[in-house]
Amino acid sequence: YFYSTKEGDASTNEYFANYKHDFLFKDSRFFLFGTGRYDYDQFQSWENRIAASAGAGYDFYKTETFDLRGTLGPGFSRTWGTENEWKPEAVLGLALAWRISESQSFEADSTYYPNLKDLPEFRLLSNAAYKIGLGEIKGLSLKLGVKDEYNSETAGDNNNLKYYGNIVYEF
């Protein structure tokens, strides 16, 4: 959830919920994936958006400390608000994870969603985060990151860039 004000008036009011599941095959670099996402943004013309995709992925490089993987598949998005539209999309993604030490890690990913109904329009979601463990409680960490959503169809500024810091507990 992201919320900010400027001179007492809301200037950012948005959130998203995301789910991703990877279906792994034993002793194989290939996998299948499925994702679903809901976005709300008070200051976009669409205000509400759902998106889903599925497809295949491949682990290009995988060790105990470093992963590099790619994904490819079909998907769709649906918006509500002043725009009420279904959009068929493709999904092309690249993600890396680096476990620097037992208590530190770095993750980055970028996913390209071309609008198959209206090429060359597209969305590009990119994230990067550094995570460091906090103290003696296993699973508790501080996560500092940046996320950007570029939408070529948005009037004006196409980038929605955010910096964040989270306290995370993994169980």
Image (tube, rainbow, N blue to C red):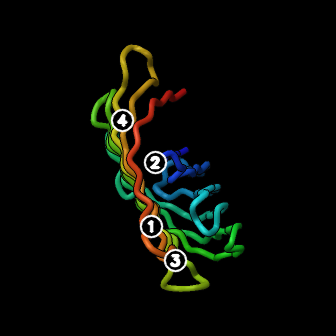
Kind of residue indicated by mark 4: Lys
Q: Nearer the viewer, residue 128 or 82?
A: 82
Residue type at numbered disc 2: Glu
Disc 4 packing (10 Å; few <14; some 14–19; many ≥20): many
Q: What residue is shown with label 1?
A: 150
Q: Earlier in the sequence, mark 2 or mark 4?
A: 2
Q: Which mark is residue 131?
A: 4
Name the disc covering residue 7, or none.
2
**Disc 1, SS:** strand
How far apart are the alpha carbons under marks 4 and 1?
24 Å
Q: Residues within 10 Å of mark 3 (few under 14, many from 20)?
A: some
Say which label, 2 or 1, has the lower sequence index.
2
Q: Residue furthest left?
A: 100
Q: CA distance from mark 3 to mark 4?
A: 33 Å
Which residue is located at x 51 percent, y 29 percent?
A: 170
Mark toward the start of the polypeptide (2 vs 3): 2
97, 10: nearer the viewer: 10
**Quarter in which the N terminus is drawn:** top right
Asked whether the viewer can see residue 87, the reply is yes
Residue sitting nearer the eye, 127 or 34? 127
Q: Which mark, residue 153?
A: 3
